[in-house]
Amino acid sequence: MYLGLDLGTSSLKALLIDDNQRILGSASAPLTVERPHHGWSEQDPYSWIHATRAALSELGKAHAAELARVRGIGLSGHMHGATTIDRDGKVIRPCILWNDTRSYHEAAELDADPIFRRLTGNIVFPGFTAPKLKWMAANEPEAFARVAKVLLPKDYLRLWLSGEAISEMSDSAGTSWLDTGKRAWDDSLLAATGLDRSHMPALVEGTERAGALRADVAADLGLPAGIPIAGGAGDNAASACGMGTVGDNHAFASLGTSGVLFAANNRYLPNPGSAVHAFCHALPGTWHQMGVILSATDSLNWLAGVTSMKPSALTSELGDTLLAPGSVMFLPYLSGERTPHNDAAIRGSFTGLEHASDRTSLTRSVLEGVCFAFRDSLAALAQAGTSLARVTAIGGGSKSDYWLEALSTVLDLPVDIPEGGDFGAAFGAARLGLIAAENADPLSVCTQPATERTIHPNRDLSAAFDEAYQTYRALYPAIKGAMS
């Protein structure tokens, strides 16, 4: 048996598989996000421990015997979060999350130094970890002075589970402290934020052993003591392991809270000017590129909230037949945007509203706007040297065939829907736990799921969507000018 723990922004998920990678069970526990000020997004790291206990307690109700036979654990988690620990191992302040934008000034200052893009292969985004520590140094100097270790969220869970401060390449590539090509911390990048290597966890590959389960925690969770914990992965790289997106130019489109267009690469292909993320993959000797949209299904959830509807009810109102874009256009920049704009201050908008605009008009425009944002990411990937032949759809938004047909038409790519199953980050983490425990071949474990069906571009509407995309592209500079 092998256990995957995925620390998400809204919940902690525990998933149990056997040696045939058959999912035996899963459970989750909710988490909350605090937003004490405009642009802030924080979480209490101790809540991650409580959620892990709760999820495993729930899983143990039906699978106590299987949990007692677990041979390896894999970890996944939301990236970029700054979890600061003092010399006694205590949390100094709430973790500053990936979607927190308070450090946009500090991010710009770091990004202005050419060494950051040259060594990390990425723009220094406000959501990344390094500018958050620079913000702490300027605004919370007493707290900053206490920092002994900076851990990413899943690696704080590892510290609790094993007592060891260890991270791995895929998650660490999103800190702005990693030389992504060399897969190592860089002293000059750390020094720019007042830190050095002593503040960093040790580094391993995601498939390697990275600590062992402490006896007291094992007894608490109903697991065997001493079992290995894999390095694991950041959430998107873990999802890629779950989907088998590990071969060169294999790709998936994740319609989750945020939107991700993820392509695996067998070589390092940075192009920071395109705002594409170039990160290490969880498997040794591999990298990946990502275009990232900050509000994908979050955009639909927002509309559902203001219309007092469920998201699924909104998409159901659209019917089964894809329609050409109407007059209403939506920019999905509810909390800024990463690819391709790197703009923490931009905000979303509706344009083209008229008397005839109704709820379905708004829903269609939200789905289309997210699809157009994915096309921006596709263009950015192409600029960075990666061309895609097809993508696999995952995430909550992939349950809507209307949305997937729109996405396929906008991207002009076939969209594959995998056979029923859970191929997300928790499953990928469990796979990494299996690899680390058994010293298994990563490529033989991280296989792709069978395709249930494929949605193809609607050629009758391609021209209409292309025209609408050009309008969409013209709106960002117009809105940006109005907001500046």
Image (tube, grey):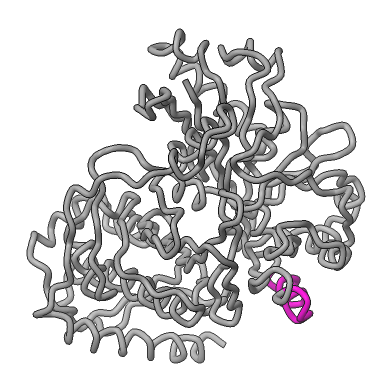
State the residue in front, 322 or 351: 322
Horizontal arrangement in the rendering, residue 56 relative to residue 166 (left or right): left
Please identify the quarter of the rendering in which residue 162 is found: top right
State the residue in front, 314 or 58: 58
Q: Is residue 309 visible?
A: no
Q: Is residue 208 above or below residue 59?
A: below
Quadrant (top left, top right, bottom left, bottom right) of the C terminus: bottom right
Q: Position of residue 154 (x, y in %)?
A: 62, 40
Q: Position of residue 402 (x, y in %)?
A: 17, 61
Q: Is residue 311 above or below residue 119?
A: above
Q: Is residue 411 magenta?
A: no
Determine the residue positioned at 27% across, 54% down: 398
Report the span colored magenta. Answer: 104-116
Determine the residue positioned at 60% across, 74% down: 270
Q: Is residue 421 visible?
A: yes
Q: Position of residue 83 (x, y in %)?
A: 72, 45
Horizontal arrangement in the rendering, residue 395 relative to residue 79 (left or right): left
Q: Is residue 114 magenta?
A: yes
Q: How many marks?
A: 0
Q: Position of residue 252 (x, y in %)?
A: 37, 58
